[in-house]
Image: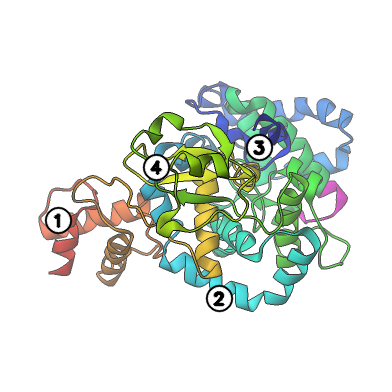
Amino acid sequence: MKKYLSKLSLLIFPLLVFIGLVSGPAQGAGNADFVQWIAALYPEAQKEGISKTTWDTAFSDVTEIDARVLERANYQPEFTTEIWDYLDARVNPLSVEKGKKMGRYYSGTLADVENKFGVQQSILLAIWSMESNYGAIFEKPERLHYVPRALATLAYGDPKRQKFARNQLFAALKILQAGDIKKEQLTGSWAGAMGHTQFIPTSYLAYGVDMDGNGRRDIWNSIPDALATAANLLHENGWRTGKTWGYEVIIPSTGEKYNEQTKTLTEWEQLGFKRPGGRAYPWPHDNAVLKLMAGPDGPAFLMMRNFYVLKNYNNSDSYALAVGLLADKIAGWGGLDQLWPRPAGSLSVGEKIEIQKRLKQRGHYSGEIDGYLGSGTKAAIRNFQVQAGMDEDGVPSQQLLRALRE
């Protein structure tokens, strides 16, 4: 599988492999030092073909670091959240229904992209959902960052991401210099991921597609460009058209010892690894890797090559699994037969959504109803707990849900 991961230096979120505390000069230095540092960086950018005009335009309004970037650099849910909670927030009735709706609305575009790049429409819809909630992120500008400022902040204030951030900064300025997007619209995540399908600048330069034919690769405003760019990334990294990402399997009593091993599907079947319901493996001679995402007590999966192609988008098993499961649901099939080993008293995805709805009805919550119980939901929970005379811990629980139902 190493060859599937070798291209990650160009791909969408390679920084996810770096986890560490933010530290460096930005924490103790003033904003004047940051501005001076930016000015001193230009000779390096000039060697990359960035004109002085582009540089000055990009940084004309940048006078201080983006403190939110350094705060968010420490939080990466793919690596800090239990798999079932991660999936609840991303593969749920709301994301599935919205995916089906967007699939109908953009059916023509999706068909054209699938015909050109060989990537299933449901996979593209799932990525779009995962990356920007089908573009809903643009409705909340407070969550977006000006990309050159964000990347300069990382390059200046986060030594662990310094090299990555410099490379992405220069790539972002090449995008601006090419005229694909105006400065005011060059927005993205704290790490510089941009547009509907969240491409970091180097990946944009490598895989960007002008699908609508207007002469610009615009993943911020053009749905055809955004979906085609995502499909092109998968296609160029070995997507196998018409094949699945993997299979849920029931492991035999001694199956745990084979975790992370690679065998053909025929060999797995001979060892007793069966699909729920006794369904057959359509491509018995293809290789697959056994993954026990939650240990031997949870669902088991045989992951195919397309699973690892998805990891070129985001190098996380949880992410690739979520895309695959959501895509299957959007396509009208799928769903797991086995249960995750949730702790006793855990909330189901339906109960998490109900908590958000009831908090909103009581005026405590103003965010999205999505099953993701993040900081906004937990703040709303604390507000309700204070009002209800409960312990103010912000923890979503069965006790909280019962109180909200009263």
Front disc: 1 or 4: 4
Residue at mark 2 to residue at mark 3: CA–CA distance: 35 Å
Q: Earlier in the sequence, mark 2 or mark 1?
A: 2
**What kind of residue is marked 3?**
Leu
Q: In percent of the image, x 39 and y 65: which residue is there? A: 369
Mark 3 sits on what residue? 151
10 Å neighbourhood of mark 3: few (<14), some, or many (≥20)?
many
**Disc assigned to residue 399:** 1
- Secondary structure, mark 3, is helix
**Disc assigned to residue 251:** 4
In the figure, 260 relative to 138: above or below?
above
Q: Earlier in the sequence, mark 1 or mark 3?
A: 3
Res. 381 in view: yes
Quadrant housing residue 231: bottom right
Residue at mark 1 to residue at mark 4: CA–CA distance: 35 Å
| Magenta stretch, residue numbers | 176-182
Front disc: 2 or 3: 2
In the figure, 158 relative to 302: above or below?
above
- Image marks 3 and 4: residues in contact by CB distance under 8 Å: no
Residue at mark 3 to residue at mark 4: CA–CA distance: 45 Å
**What kind of residue is marked 1?**
Gln
- In reply to whether residue 177 is colored magenta, the answer given is yes
Mark 2 sits on what residue? 101
- In reply to whether residue 118 is colored magenta, the answer given is no
